[in-house]
Image (cartoon, rainbow, N blue to C red):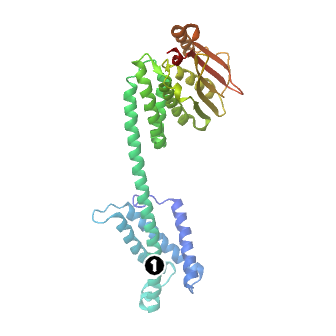
């Protein structure tokens, strides 16, 4: 019995009571019934709840020879007849005397017919709503399975990564994907797409000693897209890089270091929304790549992290005095970090 009535909650009982009351009011108004409203209400509640319990039980049955929707509609008919009989008994009337006269048969037929009509309409509505819910659940399941498959592909790619691609970021991203797969499959797919873009940009760096500003911008864009899904409205970002500069040679993994620094030291310690702007320009034979944020601002350790120290060392080894890393206050808040290298476009 408990299994048959699974799904019958207090909320559903309350909704059924309200629906029964509304139906009784409609019948009283539309048919100008001689019965008093309380008398009709008793009949409506008894028949209505009989239908509700019967439809719930039919929905929990598994019959090979009868589809569930057909079983539920059949339950409406049987419950309407049975509920109408129950009304006669509840009101203390003689069941045999009721069927012995035409007026009693007419009353019985009217009550049962109204139960079939209104109960059938609501049951059809529930059947279609349940079918729609099943289709949505099925679609979400397929989407979640696709997300899981994509996550496994990403994890396989992760196994190929070397130490220069920050493992902390990648593990955090995969952990976020796993959470989103269970809670927000669409966001999980978006994050996986951006992670794949990130890996596509990062993996060639392990085999190549050079890159272009355009490639580094796409690397940075994929990273920021991932962070934006994690941070939500706290992170806003934009790019101001002229198309003619995208083909310029640029050292790999330097641009991403500045952006990671802006997220770690500018956004994460801040309670406010933070704007990150990535820009590039040429000036006096120098190519300037700048990452400006409106985050937490300068601190004593700003510019002293291992990543920035290594970046300064690489710049010095590659470009001598013409390779620079400048860290300064941004206006009105935050930090502005700029890499300067000789403009390879003018060098040719």
Residue lying furthest right: 332
Q: Where is residue 33 in the image (x, y as percent from the top left)?
A: 56, 85
Please name whichever residue, 46 or 252, is drawn nearer the observer in this view of the structure: 252
Percent across and percent down for residue 263 are 58, 26
Coordinates of residue 318 in the picture (x, y in percent) = 51, 10
Q: Does residue 282 show up?
A: yes
Q: Residue furthest left?
A: 65
Residue 72 occupies which quadrant of the picture?
A: bottom left
Q: Is residue 41 visible to the viewer in this orientation of the structure?
A: no
Q: Residue at x 54, y 80 (%)?
A: 27
Residue position marked by numbered label 1 in the rendering = 84
Residue 137 vertical position relative to residue 45 in the rendered view, above or below: above
Q: Which corner quadrant holds the N terminus?
A: bottom left
Is residue 268 left or right of 141 when viewed as pictured? right
Q: How crowded is mark 1: few (under 14 residues within 10 Å), some or many (20 or more)?
A: many
Residue lying at 56% horizontally and 68% vertically, measured from the top left: 18
Does 21 appear above or below 105? above
Q: Tag count in the figure?
A: 1
Position of residue 320 relative to residue 8, above or below, is: above
Q: What element carries label 1?
A: helix
């Amino acid at each position: 019995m408990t299994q048959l009535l699974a799904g019958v909650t207090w909320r559903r009982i309350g909704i059924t009571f309200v629906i029964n009351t509304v139906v009784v009011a409609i019948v009283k108004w539309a048919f100008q019934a001689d019965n008093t409203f309380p008398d009709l209400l008793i009949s409506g509640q008894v028949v209505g709840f009989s239908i509700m319990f019967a439809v719930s039980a039919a929905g929990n049955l598994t019959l090979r020879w009868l589809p569930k929707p057909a079983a539920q509609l059949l339950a409406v008919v049987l419950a309407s007849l049975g509920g109408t009989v129950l009304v006669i008994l509840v009101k203390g009337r003689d069941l045999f005397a009721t069927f012995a006269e035409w007026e009693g048969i007419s009353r019985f037929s009217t009550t049962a017919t109204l139960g079939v009509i209104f109960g059938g309409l609501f049951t059809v509505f529930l059947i279609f709503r349940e079918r729609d819910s099943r289709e949505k659940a099925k679609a979400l399941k397929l989407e979640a399975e696709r997300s899981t498959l994509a996550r496994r592909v990403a994890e396989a790619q992760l196994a190929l990564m070397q130490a220069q691609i920050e493992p902390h970021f990648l593990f955090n991203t995969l952990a976020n994907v796993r959470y989103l797969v269970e809670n927000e499959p669409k966001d999980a797919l978006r994050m996986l797409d951006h992670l794949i873009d990130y890996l596509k940009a990062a993996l060639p760096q392990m085999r190549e000693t050079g890159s272009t500003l355009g490639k580094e911008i796409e690397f940075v864009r994929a990273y920021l897209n991932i962070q934006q899904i994690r941070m939500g409205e706290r992170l806003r970002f934009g790019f101001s890089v002229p198309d003619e500069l995208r083909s310029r040679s640029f050292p790999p993994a330097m641009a991403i270091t500045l952006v990671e620094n802006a997220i770690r030291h500018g956004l994460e310690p801040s309670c406010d929304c933070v704007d990150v702007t990535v820009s590039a320009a040429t000036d006096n034979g120098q190519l300037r790549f700048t990452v400006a944020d409106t985050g937490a601002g300068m601190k004593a350790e700003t510019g002293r992290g291992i990543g920035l120290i290594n970046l300064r060392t690489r710049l010095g080894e590659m470009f001598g005095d013409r390779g620079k890393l400048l860290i300064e206050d941004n206006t009105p808040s935050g930090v502005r970090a700029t890499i300067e290298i000789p403009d390879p476009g003018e060098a040719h």
